[in-house]
Image: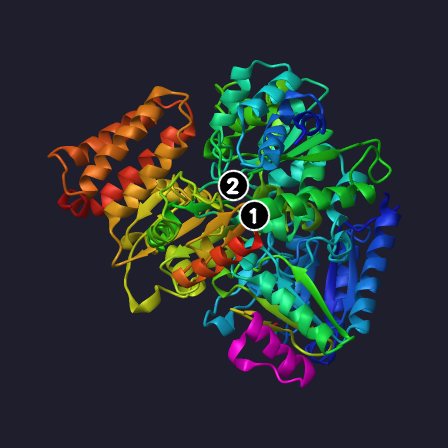
Amino acid sequence: MDREAIVKGFEPQLHNILYILHELQDNNPRHFVAKEDIEACADYLKVPYSYVHGVATFYTMFSLTPRGRHIIRLCDSPPCHLMGSTTVLDYLRQKLGIDVGETTPDGAFTLELASCLGICGVAPAIMINDEMFGKLTPDRVDGILEERRKGV
Amino acid sequence: MNIARSHVLISIDAGTIMAGARGVQAELVEEIKKKGLSGEVAVLETGNLGVTGMGVVLVVYPEGFYYGNVTKEDIPEFVEEQLLKGRLVKRLLLTQAPKRFIIRREKMGLTKEQPRIVLKNCGFINPESIEEYIAAGGYEAASKALTAMTPEEVIGEVKRSALAGRGGAAFPTAAKWEFARKAPGEEKFIICNADEGEPGTFKDRLILEGDPHKLLEGMLIAGYAVGASKGFIYIRGEYALSIERTEKAIADARSYGLLGNTIFDKPFGFDIEVMKGAGAYVCGEETALIESLEGHRGHPRNKPPYPVVSGLWGKPTVVNNVETLANIAEIVRNGANWFKQYGTPKCAGTKVYTILGHVATPGLIETEMGTTLRDIIYDYGGGIGDGKQFKGALVGGAAGAFLGPDMLDVQMDFVNLKEYAAALGSGAILVMNQDTSMVDMLKSVLHFFKHESCGHCAPCRLGTARLVEIVDRIADSEAKADDVDRLLAIASVMKDTSFCPLGQSLYLPVSSCLKYFREEIAGS
Amino acid sequence: MNLDELKAIREKAKKDIQLRQKEARIKIVVGMGTSGIASGAREVLRSFVDEIAGRNLVDVMVTQTGEKGFASQEPMIEVLEEGKPGVIYGNMDAEKARKVVAEHIVKGNPVLEYVIETS
């Protein structure tokens, strides 16, 4: 992965920082913002390392620790909570054998919590990478995980 | 050139002719001539207008008012009041709205019709086709604004419509525009706040995904009115499909010359860019959003100065919500009077609500301002599912208010709910049935705030942490004697001392939950 | 872009849409908003496309739209046929899609048990 090429895809202006960080994270094989990513971004935008670090840690979509290929973000805001997101969370924990913030040993899945994903009409909901899934039941979760595993 | 400012359509078909339509038509033309309105008002014949059994039917455009059972004797009053003075002749007005704004849900066991202004095209046109949007009358309003109206006239029309911001704060839209227009400076910006993060809200996503050109057209008109040449749409990072479709819409609009250096042969240029957020609820606050757009951590700014004076890069900036901007094209096209036929005297127009939780058919509706919670839950939401009873609702998202059964019949609009110490907010309505634990709900709300507190100011950063500790104790039946009072005390201090609305707004869910469900919370 | 051009585009767009609709005897509109997709609209769309291609139905068009707002009924699809009221189906899946093609599209009998609304 060529960090220099990625950052150069954007004008060197500060307001592109979120786009640059998104792009660096998406292209990182471990789906996180690494120290080197922050350095590349800081050098390109001519701001201190600490500045980029500050921005990256402010937003929940950026992770500063390595993650799995599929990032499962479970919504635990009040609407999903009311419709049983806790049950889905327990099922995911048990099924994947990991807790929130952890990654499965095979590097396939990372489990995270997210604030409202905006598909409350089909709650409870999760987002895996860029895709959303709703009306979740244990059966449906099994199917989705299986498909993702195969898709790797 | 002589342009008629309004048209009166008269339905001429077998039924209306029998009711005397020809005589009414002749009288109408004569009366218009007599009042000297011939150049301004045109009378057009049309076929059946979709209304039957209502005698002679007239429709006034652009407002879209339907009149029925009109006789020759009514004409002088009709011309005097409606056409000359712009006042409605209520006794002749048909309550039926034009069919094209109506969506029926009867087959779903739901009987209420929805007047759809904002969501008119959503779910009907292909959002990735600019041609379909144009075929549905798209960009007509923008062409009208840019070629036949001055910026002041556009602001005037929006002002008369009394459109208030739909993001939750309900600030008059035209006032914002006027401030920014009058603010000194060459460069000005329009920002569309599409950082929709209020739990239970997804109305903006529906528009971005289902009818993105509606938003672009609204922004184009706003840009013209304010004197801005650049617009940004700040979309939350989780809304991948919204970002994709909005970007496609912008590219299509550019290639059709609807965005660019000269639009409609006017020396007015406008372009729009999408900004992708990265997950921070606080960026829904307008100054935090501006900070984020500039490339900083999304901390809110001091107000004043307000963004209309000093916003993005210190330039005058209008920040409007998606739903607000999606109203603009329809207001400009149909006129303020048409818009005001919907809603209440204090709050004009419609509101998009999301109905969620324990209702039979969760989803999203658009209905008039002033609809009661009971109507929304039982007529649009299909009632409480599984034969259960209503216990309460959280209205306005996590920063909204819990309401008990005695609030079911209160008219909901921005002004009226305030009198009951509640708020309409983003229009999210989370319904809870008899089995719901209110401690659990309050816990969920407070955990949300703790997670989303940006850490900028101490009252919010520390307050949310303390509140979560307390509510967790209550949930675990380990509450101390004064814990319930302490919840309220902390929330109250946060309301008075927090830097931005995030910390301030938390008082509302805490106080309202205790107002209706104190016994349950204290008894846990 | 000027006023006349907008008018011209509008007229052309209307004609194009009519023309497409004339070429296509039936239009199947799949609700492809996020709620729809999250409930399986992609599989439904794929199923329609496969089934229509498999049966070589050249006069049927599959297209997409956003959400209508009835999240609980997603995935939703609408079948539009000239001169007939539109039929909206709800809670669709791949299997139901195949049945709709076999019964409604081919034989002209709407599958009433899936219908949630007519427009």
Tell me the amino acid under the disc marked 2: Glu
Q: Which mark is residue B404?
A: none
Q: Which residue is mark 2?
A: B196
Q: Residue at x 71, y 22 (%)?
A: B187
> In this view of the protein, can residue B180 be seen by the observer?
yes
Q: Are marks 1 and 2 in contact (CB under 8 Å)?
A: yes
Q: Residue at x 55, y 20 (%)?
A: A52
Percent across and percent down for residue B109 are: 45, 72
Assess whether residue C104 is covered by the magenta stretch.
yes
Judge from the rendering whether residue B4 lies leftward or rightward of residue B187; answer left or right. right
Q: Quadrant of the N terminus of chain B?
A: top right
Protein chain holding label 2: B
Q: Residue at x 69, y 18 (%)?
A: B185
Q: Which mark is residue B205?
A: 1
Percent across and percent down for residue B472 are: 23, 38
Q: Residue furthest left?
A: B481
Q: Quadrant of residue B414?
A: top left
Is C93 drawn above or below residue A52 in the view shown? below
Q: Residues within 10 Å of mark 1 (few under 14, many from 20)?
A: many
**Which secondary structure lies at badge 1?**
helix
Judge from the rendering whether residue C6 lies leftward or rightward of residue A104; answer left or right. right
Magenta: predominant secondary structure element? helix
Q: Which residues are magenta?
A: C94-117
Protein chain holding label 1: B
